[in-house]
Image: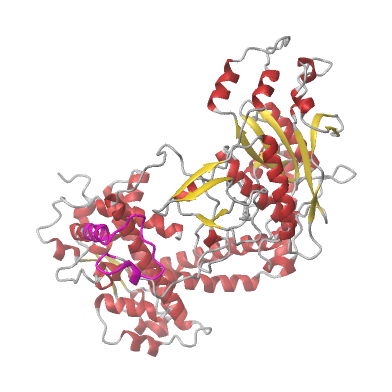
Amino acid sequence: MKKTTKVAAVALAAALSTSLLAGCDITTNIQKDYAQTIAEVNITESENFAGSEYAAYGDVIGTTEITKRDMVAYFISTGYSMMESYGWTYHDTFAMISETLVNRQIYIQYAMLYLIDDESEPDITVAGYEAAVAGQSGIERRLAALAYFLNEEEEAQALYSTRQLINNTLDSQEERYLDHDHSHDESTTARTTPTGIDTETEDYYNEAYRIYTGINAAADCPGYEAPEGSTPTTRRKAYSSFLASLRSNSLIESGEDVSDVESLSYFKSELATSYETALINKLTEKFEDNIRATVNESYAQEIYDTTYSRQETTFANDTDSFETALEGVSDTSFVLTAPEANYGYVINILIPFSTSQSLELENAPADLGDTKGNNFLQRAGLLKNVRGTDQRGTWFDEDYAFDGSENEKVYTGGNEARSYLFFEDSLGGNEQYERVSNYLGYYTYNGTVRQNEDETYTVRPNRITIDDFIAEMEGYLAQAASEVSIEGDGYTLSEGTYVDGIGSDDVVNAVSDNTTYYNRTVSDYYTESGAVDYSKFVYYAGKVNFTNGFNANEFFLPGSAENVTYSVINELSFAYNTDTAGLNDYFGYVISTGATDYVPEFEYAAQYVCRQGAGSYVVVPSDYGWHVIYCTFSFVADEDGNVIPPYTFNWADRTTEGTFSYLFYEALCSDLVSEYASIRQSNAIEDFKDCAVVYEDRYADLSGLDTAS
């Protein structure tokens, strides 16, 4: 389900259920009162219109009347939540609503004239518009007028979006009537999912999709999935509640056929809003085409070079601003250089002590013979018994799991009974949904699964040691190497090794097994000078070797060695990591070269892998448990100690989705389009603002609710 639509629907359902204005003595005839026109908009009546480039098309624009009902509908859907969030008064809120509705209609009328005047839209004409609205009045004329400027696909997408909004609103209402089975532990927190799960593709729509009210059958609504436990009875209750909310807020007119939801004036009003949004988006796309035509290779390269030079100068003199920039890296915000090498990012997969183990460690006295008061030996003994578990069990409850036994690419760790995967719709098998990025999707649930008669699941995760996890990680990385699809690209794994300290030259002292690690004496944890030797806490080390060297330009490019390995580690993090703050980070945790706020064992190990470069990983403990630390990216230096720029802008790669050049180009265009569209919108509203007539006295009772008794 498209998340933005779902969130909007939940908010709408909550607002409707409160009957926000019910009980206020607004008028003795609320239907008549809400039908009042509180503003009129006709840009042809602006003093500036006659001298504008659109003067010849003035006959197209009629007067748009904004009613009091429009204000109330906007207040329920948007205004009330803003009022609550920002602490606004009713007066301030309805002043904002009035201005917003007026400005929107000015811009809608401007968009219509723009498209009629646009030579790239030869089918949009004055005569065609007049024919489309001929004989129509009221909401039907408004819908016909807006639909004329949309193509069939844009119109269908707007209708689909409106149907989704109503269905999702009804879903939220229906949840109150459903008696869900809470046999699972209610204290269990739902596992975080990767960003982008169940996100519909931008242009997707389903013409057969319908609103399910319970009056009709769910089977007659293709593409719609009812909430778990839904019945026709609970759905009809939800629909009745929805209608009651509309009535209490005077959003249903007398005599309307409530058995046909799409015939309701409220639905048509929401559809008109969707049409308006589609029209505004269409105009923005026109602006985007105009802007992209101005962004040539030399301009884009100049912006890149300027950005690089500015960052080089700024970061060299201000480390704090550099580290702040590292924290803010995203698809639209890039760090192109560093003041020195070895800054980087790591993914931290925490496999923790159990509650009893943590308590035992907390109460443990100092190791016998340790004059520093530390208990490193006793902690090492507890680490032997730490067990990790696959944390994705709650995804079964959320209907994300599916049996992937027919998929030849599944990773089972040698256990053929493991077959369950997650996010089938978002792994490329459903055109409705975008392919989730940076998540390979072949790592099976590590545990036992039984499907029950009621289609629920009983799951039990396997309890694995840190050595088991290392085997799972390296095994999955090795298998996933075949997923690299770029010709000539690839990676191999260095043979990982158990560690007995790391020298000052960063050379690992390798040992054949973990015996040395668990059989140390107190003195082994200290240097000759008496300082704690944090290299001695590193348990295991390994590295991914990229065939062509690590290429940051292809980090997010699907099928590249860089992205495949990152996707593997990211998927394993979602499976085992109990450090939930680290899930869905862009590159991972920022690692600086100086002192940090991290615990010292983690700080040492993370800085070590960043010095080794992307693909390096180590296992190290802290008082929280085992940390598996994987370097996703770090800045490296040349032989003279100068930081090598990790990225290059290549004009030819700007259309290859996932490359740095693509991301940089898209961010550049997006900024320009956003700025240009904002300027055009602001100018249009300002140029024609004097066309609006607002009757503030007709909604004075609403804006005066702060002082109403």
Q: Residue furthest left?
A: 28
Residue 479 in which image quadrant: bottom right
Residue 700 in which image quadrant: bottom left
Q: How many numbered discs?
A: 0
Task: Please say whether residue 324 is one of the residues in the magenta stretch.
Answer: no
Boundaries of the magenta span: 213-241
> Which residue is drawn at the image coordinates 30% and 48% (left, top)?
179
Q: Is residue 488 left or right of residue 107?
A: right
> Which residue is drawn at the image coordinates 42% and 54% (left, top)?
455
Q: Is residue 125 left or right of residue 523?
A: left
The foreground one among 96 and 439 is: 439
Q: Is residue 339 left or right of residue 169?
A: right
Residue 173 in which image quadrant: bottom left
How far across and down, in percent of the image, does residue 350 sit? 62, 36
As drawn, 331 above or below 89: below
Q: Is residue 311 visible?
A: yes
Task: Please say whether residue 226 is one of the residues in the magenta stretch.
Answer: yes
Q: Quadrant of the N terminus?
A: bottom left
The foreground one among 661 and 257 is: 257
How far across and down, in percent of the image, does residue 385 sit? 63, 28
As drawn, 644 above or below 425: above
Q: Is residue 307 visible?
A: no
> Which residue is drawn at the image coordinates 42% and 79% (left, top)?
149
The foreground one among 127 and 1 is: 1
How far across and down, in percent of the image, does residue 223 sit? 41, 68
